[in-house]
Image (tube, helix red, strand yellow):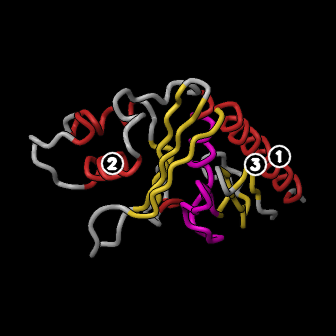
Amino acid sequence: MKRLLIGSPATFAIESFMAQVLARPGQRGLGYFCLHVGSKLYGIRSPDATLLACSFDAVVRRIEGRGTHVLAGLDHLDAIAVAQDVHAALYEDLPEEAHPCGMTVIRLSEELYRHAILMAPDGDAAFDDGGHVLQFDLGEQVRLIAFKNPDADETGVHAIVEVRMNAGDFYEILASWKEQFMAQWDSALIAQKP
């Protein structure tokens, strides 16, 4: 199967590979799904990293939600502060009086999911490398903040990158990947038929 790389890794790109095609839409294939943000790779690039349906469905939902990935108060804060506060809210045992990004921990977690700010992880093993990508729709621009969780022995986050790009270009990358992935999947299923 051919590797798909849509976009520019220096800014933003989606990379995927289907090592094995699977007929069930709930699985689609075995392979990998990675995101490139600012020349850094987020996700596991291994032919057996994950089933691809979850990532495919997440891209479809993200396209359908265009313009709704907005979280007032977070979208203009410093990228390092956002990455650290999001990591703390999602994974650290913070006291109730802590207010990452000016919100309670519970409210911040709820708002991240309600507005689908977390582009990755997308719910499966594709980002078991600790990769996280946050997306903020800012009118005609999209702001991406990407980071990785630390190893168990470390504190904080690392590999923090921020990219701003034209919203039309961003969503075109998503739509192009979706179309090319579906074409690849359909042709692979046809090739499997006796």
- Indicate which disc, 2 or 3, sits on the residue closer to the N terminus: 2
Residue 186 in the image: state x and y as whole percent. 82, 48
Residue 168, located in which quarter of the rendered image? Answer: top right
- Label 1, label 3: how many angstroms apart (C-alpha)? 5 Å
First in sequence: mark 2 vs mark 1: 2
Percent position of residue 30, x then y: 65, 62
Q: Is residue 151 left or right of residue 2?
A: left
Q: Please name the residue that numbered disc 3 is placed on.
A: 181
Q: Do tag 1 and tag 3 residues touch (Cβ < 8 Å)?
A: yes
Q: Nearer the viewer, residue 51 or 156?
A: 156
Whether residue 122 is visible to the viewer of this picture, yes or no, is no
> Quick check: 157 above or below 6?
below
Q: Quadrant of residue 166?
A: top right
User: Could you tell me residue 112's position as x and y percent?
Assistant: 37, 37
Q: Nearer the viewer, mark 2 or mark 3?
A: 2
Q: What's the mark number on residue 183? A: 1
| Circle 1: residue type | Ala
> Residue at 66% of width from left, 49% of height from top?
24
Where residue 99 appears, as percent x and y from the top left, is: 18, 39
Locate residue 104: give its quadrant: top left
Mark 1: which secondary structure?
helix
Q: CA distance from mark 2 to mark 3?
A: 35 Å
Q: In the rendered structure, which segment of residues is drawn in magenta?
A: 32-61
Relative placement, left or right, of 158 versus 42 is: left
Residue that badge 2 annotates = 81
Q: Is residue 21 left or right of residue 150?
A: right
The structure residue drawn at horizontal position 37% and vertical position 26%, both measured from the top left corner, is 72
**Number of other residues with Cα within 10 Å of mark 2, as a class: few under 14, some 14 to 19, many 20 or more:** few
Residue sitting nearer the eye, 1 or 148? 148
